[in-house]
Amino acid sequence: MDNVCHTLVGVAAARAGLNTKTRLATVTLAVAANLPDIDVLVFATDIPSVAFRRGWTHGPVAHVLLPIALAGVMWVVAGRIRPASPHRSFRWLLALSFIGVGTHIFLDYLNNYGVRLLMPFSERWFYGDAVFIVDVWLWGMLGIGALLARGGRTRLRGSAWWPLRCTSS
């Protein structure tokens, strides 16, 4: 899937109630939902992109390490924003990071390009062939869902509407 869709899935998960669990929950879910695509950095090298894309960063090793790294970063960031905040939980940041990364890998599996789920142990591609890589119908459904999940407070002007704003902190 494309990164707009991944981000909208993270925001929709936050708006489903996960944004009340800890500080920076919405941002953590949105970033985690995009994190496995860090492999796009291969385009800045001489390595053929197909040799690396949707491989190591989408496999089981990364599925464990990426959420732990993100939770650690978000824990530090949340502590620097409000050091004495009681609404900061590493366990929730870790759980949200795992959820976000998991949604990313699942959505990439669903499309016609697929993902190498077992990399580095196997280079076999898995694909669900259910949706195209860019799916505007998913954008619409997830975007409308994120807007409606804000309750009666949705205003479409300025930063009051911005979906990545953490309203629970």
Image (spheres, helix red, strand yellow):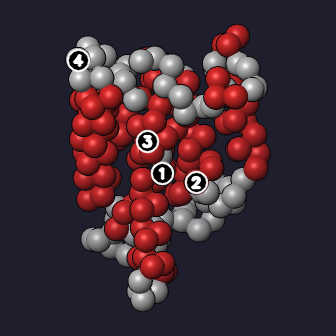
As measured in the structure, the alpha-carbon distance from the residue carrying label 4 to the one carrying label 1 is 29 Å
Measured from the top left, where is residue 80 in percent x and y? 27, 31
The residue depicted at 41 percent of the width and 83 percent of the height is 45
Q: Earlier in the sequence, mark 2 or mark 4?
A: 2
Q: Quadrant of the N terminus?
A: bottom right
Q: Residues within 10 Å of mark 1 (few under 14, many from 20)?
A: many
* Closer-to-camera residue (132/136): 136
Q: Is residue 93 left or right of residue 142?
A: left
Q: Residues within 10 Å of mark 2 (few under 14, many from 20)?
A: some
Measured from the top left, where is residue 34 in percent x and y? 48, 51
Residue at the disc numbered 3: 100
Q: Disc number at residue 3?
A: 2
When the figure is inspected, residue 69 is found, relative to residue 29, above or below; the finding is: below
Kind of residue indicated by mark 1? Asn
The residue depicted at 24 percent of the width and 23 percent of the height is 83
Q: Is residue 60 left or right of residue 13?
A: left
Residue at the disc numbered 4: 84
As measured in the structure, the alpha-carbon distance from the residue carrying label 3 to the one carrying label 2 is 12 Å
Q: Disc number at residue 34?
A: 1
Q: Quadrant of residue 70?
A: top left
Q: Earlier in the sequence, mark 3 or mark 2?
A: 2
Q: Nearer the viewer, mark 4 or mark 1?
A: 4
Q: Is residue 77 left or right of residue 130?
A: left
Kind of residue indicated by mark 2? Asn
